[in-house]
């Protein structure tokens, strides 16, 4: 099949590479425009664009898919089907019929659970034991189209959203190729999504990643893992932001100090922080304007006074 690929971030790269290695022909790539990032605000191309250009593929990066001339450029590629993996913009209704087999979206949840932009983060945040990925036919509704294929993936106890998404990106790439194989063979029957079990996964912003130490230890642990690597969990210390890598809940026992929410206990080799239940052990932290460091090294530098708290 002649396939138009639409994707932008690193998580979409395994799918593009899998399609390039398959029996299908990738006729072009649609990606988001170059963006400024980093402290120097340098312009950077998307990871998908870098792979596409290395493969010698035509690349389209319009600001909006409704822009003049975009439709004619896509039509000129004559795709049989369009693959979408984390493209980053909605496909206008008038483009949904661009290809005979439509737009096939790889989504990293078991729809209808976690419809939206951040399904993996919400799965970790909710404490799901199992998640997965599906391919489905893109339509006007938000992730509501009929499902073409699916796979499941266990959520491991210490998974961050980055860990889980990394595994799903690889297995999902195989699912995407298998879906196009079956579409070409004419063996797929799209299955409508059930009406029950719908949940939503809106994009998570920096404000959502602030740790509330008045919550139980398990909830703090999930939040930090869900926000790792992006947008990055954080709290405050003496008025400045302190970024946090994954923490570990401490099992209740006679030697565990009783700490109020956010209260610090700095030992020689570990730093504990109180929650609504048992404390959590800090891992790596990043003070404002500095590099990552072990929490114990940070505490030796700042010398917290007795009773001082994070998040005040």
Image (cartoon, helix red, strand yellow):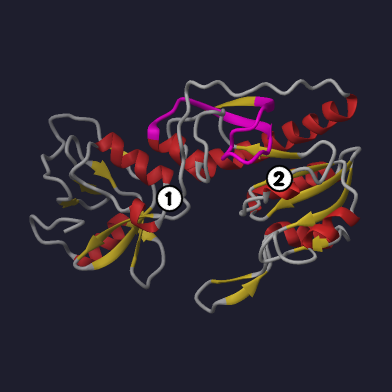
Element assignment for label 1: loop
Which is nearer the eye, 20 or 117?
117
Q: Is residue 120 magenta?
A: no
Q: Secondary structure at mark 2?
A: strand
The relative height of residue 229 versus residue 39 in the rendered view (above or below) is above
- What is the x, y in percent for residue 308? 12, 58
The residue beneath circle 2 is 84
Spot the residue most to the front. 94
Residue bounds of the magenta highlight? 126-150
Query: Looking at the figure, which quarter contains the C terminus?
Result: bottom left
Q: Give the label on residue 204, or none.
A: 1
* Distance between the alpha carbons at the discs numbered 1 and 2: 21 Å
Q: Quadrant of residue 35?
A: bottom right
Q: Position of residue 171 (x, y in %)?
A: 68, 34
Please tell me which residue is depicted at 10% across the width and 39% down the height of the picture.
258
Q: Residue at x 28, y 56 (%)?
A: 296
Residue 198: horizontal and vertical position, in percent?
Answer: 48, 28
Residue at horizontal 49 percent and vertical 34 percent from the top: 114
| Observer-nearest of 229 and 210 | 210
Is 21 above or below relative to 299? above
Which residue is at the far bottom?
40
């Amino acid at each position: 099949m002649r396939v138009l690929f639409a994707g932008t971030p690193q998580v979409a790269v395994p799918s593009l590479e899998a399609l390039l290695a398959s029996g299908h022909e990738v006729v072009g790539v649609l990606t988001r425009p170059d963006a400024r990032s980093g402290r120097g605000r340098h312009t950077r191309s998307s990871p998908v664009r870098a792979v596409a250009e290395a493969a010698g593929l035509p690349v389209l990066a319009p600001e909006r898919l409704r822009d003049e001339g975009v439709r004619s450029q896509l039509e000129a590629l004559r795709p049989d089907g369009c693959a979408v993996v984390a493209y980053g913009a909605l496909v206008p209704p008038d483009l949904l019929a661009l290809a005979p087999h439509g737009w096939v979206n790889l989504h990293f949840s078991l729809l209808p659970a976690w419809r939206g932009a951040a399904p993996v983060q919400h799965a970790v945040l909710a404490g799901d034991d199992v998640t997965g990925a599906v391919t489905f036919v893109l339509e006007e509704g938000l992730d509501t189209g009929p499902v073409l294929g699916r796979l499941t993936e266990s959520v491991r106890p210490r998974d961050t959203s980055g860990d889980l998404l990394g595994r799903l990106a690889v297995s999902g790439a195989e699912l995407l190729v298998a879906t196009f194989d079956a579409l070409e063979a004419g063996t797929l029957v799209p299955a409508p999504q059930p009406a029950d079990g719908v949940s939503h996964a809106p994009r998570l912003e920096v404000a959502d990643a602030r740790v509330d130490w008045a919550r139980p230890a398990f909830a703090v642990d999930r939040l930090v893992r869900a926000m790792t690597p992006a947008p990055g969990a954080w709290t405050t210390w003496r008025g400045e932001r302190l970024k946090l890598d994954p923490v570990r809940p401490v099992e209740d026992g006679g030697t565990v100090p009783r700490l109020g929410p956010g209260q610090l206990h700095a030992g020689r080799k570990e730093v504990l922080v109180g929650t609504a239940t048992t404390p959590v052990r800090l891992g790596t932290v990043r003070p404002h304007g500095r590099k990552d460091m072990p929490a114990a090294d940070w505490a030796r530098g700042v010398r917290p006074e007795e009773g001082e708290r994070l998040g005040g």
